[in-house]
Image (cartoon, rainbow, N blue to C red):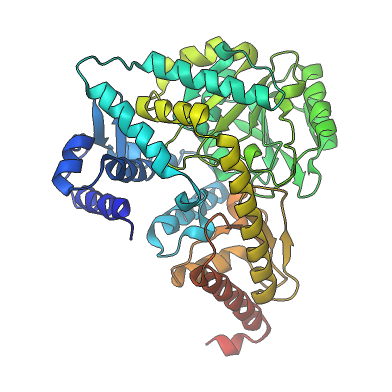
Amino acid sequence: MKRYLQLAAEFESLILNGTLEPGVRLPSVRQASCSYRVSPSTVFHAYYTLERRALIVARPRSGYFVASRSASTKSLAIVPKRSIEEADGDSLTIRFMKAQRRCAHPGLGSSEPSAQLFPFGRISRSLTAATRMMASSRNTLSAGTAEAALRRQIALRYAVTGVTVPIEEVVVTSGALDALILCLKVLTRPGDTIAIERPAFHAVQDAVKRLRLKTVEIPVDPHRGLDLGVLAAALRQHPVRVCWFMTTLHQPTGATLSDERKEALVSLLAKHGVPLIEDDVFRELHFGLTPAYPAKRFDSNGLVLHCGSFSKSLAPGLRLGWVAAGRYAARIEHERWLTMTPASVPAQCAIADYLEHGDYDRLLRKLRRQLASLQTLMVAAVIRYFPKGTVVIRPPGGFFLWVQLPEGVEAVQLFEMAEAHEIAIAPGAIFSCGREFDRHIRLNYGRPWSPDVEKEIHTLGTLARRAIACQLKPESCH
């Protein structure tokens, strides 16, 4: 086990057994580095790991603190007064998230790529330099300076991809999900109707429920993407306040709308005066020679709020996202200051420094080649080990496979069987409000290939075959 994971496990144990109570301040990076005889970057990685698990929270210029019980379970909160079906769906999502923490082999079900694919050494040096600057008596590094530098680099990234976004339109957040929820909070009120995809990332459904919104689900075809005809009908029939879509490398299907269809989408929404929250965290991970444009490129009315992140393409765990908010930038900025925890200043400095000096495009080219190779290996393994009739959707990028299981295998059943073997997977039912896709699973191929990974796929295939056998001959399963 890597040293930063060992250190994170030590702190996690102290938190879970009550030795470190909610609100207690953790040792500073410098103190922990001296006490545990590790580098500052090791401490940073350990703390970011704990922060991702919602066990600690970072407070700007104050340090790291043990999260409150409510904060650590906030993403799992159940909103009262919902139907039994919704409550059952929630319990499946919670079971999936618990399996991610509990299973010895969580990689196939993870929502993040492996940290081993990224240049943590280079980013760690930038983090250490920023931390030292903040700790110096000069204290020349302010939150405003750090954010301005990062916003400038984000605006430059847009320009490189042929999209013009003014710097003042960019709002930096603690992760893409914060940016997406921030947009939703500004654009809606409880009881409003929004359009989301079917299937959709489970965090979308969680946000909708917490903000007490109604939804219209628009189907996504794994090959063509969002069904614009169904969307047009929904806009005529329902008072849709805003749309939340992934137009490129949609999760979980991997579908990408063509540039022509993205332009048609933006035109359709402009006709109805409906804003689009564009969740675009995977676009940099395309496998083609040129990336697809975001829908933002076709927006001339300021109605597209384009949300991105570096957690999928540069630094998993650093929790840095942003939104290019169009005509809503001022409102988004105001709401962020009122309700959101500011993004980490050292993290902003480190990412801005890497974007300016670290040859990000070379990293992306290498990462895309790795992911394309890993996808090929996992597709081959699924075909080799899973039962006949399994269908694998190969996306043109990203790090997820959307797998349709054959008749006789239910995704929840396979999820439970896999969990008993210490393997976590994502069952398709968590990606739909109506708990559909009960014969689909999402698999993550974004980690180095190894005999252990192949063994996990082999085990899943064996379990799927066993499920079919049990259905055909129930007596053989006793």
Question: Residue 28, can we see it?
Answer: no
In this rendered view, identify the residue nearer to me: 152 or 445: 152
User: Which residue lies at the image location 44% right of the left edge and 56% below the top edge?
Assistant: 100
The quarter holding residue 139 reads: top left
The image shows residue 195, relative to residue 111, as above or below, that is above
The image shows residue 144, relative to residue 313, as above or below, that is above
Question: Residue 275, can we see it?
Answer: yes
- Image quadrant where one finds the N terminus: bottom left
Q: Position of residue 464 (x, y in %)?
A: 62, 74
The image shows residue 148, relative to residue 14, as above or below, that is above
Q: Position of residue 460 (x, y in %)?
A: 57, 72
Q: Position of residue 347 (x, y in %)?
A: 39, 30
User: Which residue lies at the image location 19% right of the left edge and 50% below the top edge?
Assistant: 14
User: Which residue lies at the image location 54% right of the left edge and 22% below the top edge?
Assistant: 153
In this rendered view, identify the residue nearer to me: 96 or 350: 350
The mark tally for this picture is 0
Decide if residue 72 is on the left or right side of residue 400: left
Decide if residue 315 is on the left or right side of residue 51: right
In this rendered view, identify the residue nearer to me: 217 or 264: 264
Decide if residue 81 is on the left or right side of residue 254: left
Decide if residue 76 is on the left or right side of residue 254: left
The image shows residue 97, relative to residue 333, as above or below, that is below
The quarter holding residue 240 reads: top right
Q: Position of residue 30 (x, y in %)?
A: 20, 35
User: Which residue lies at the image location 41% right of the left edge and 63% below the top edge?
Assistant: 103
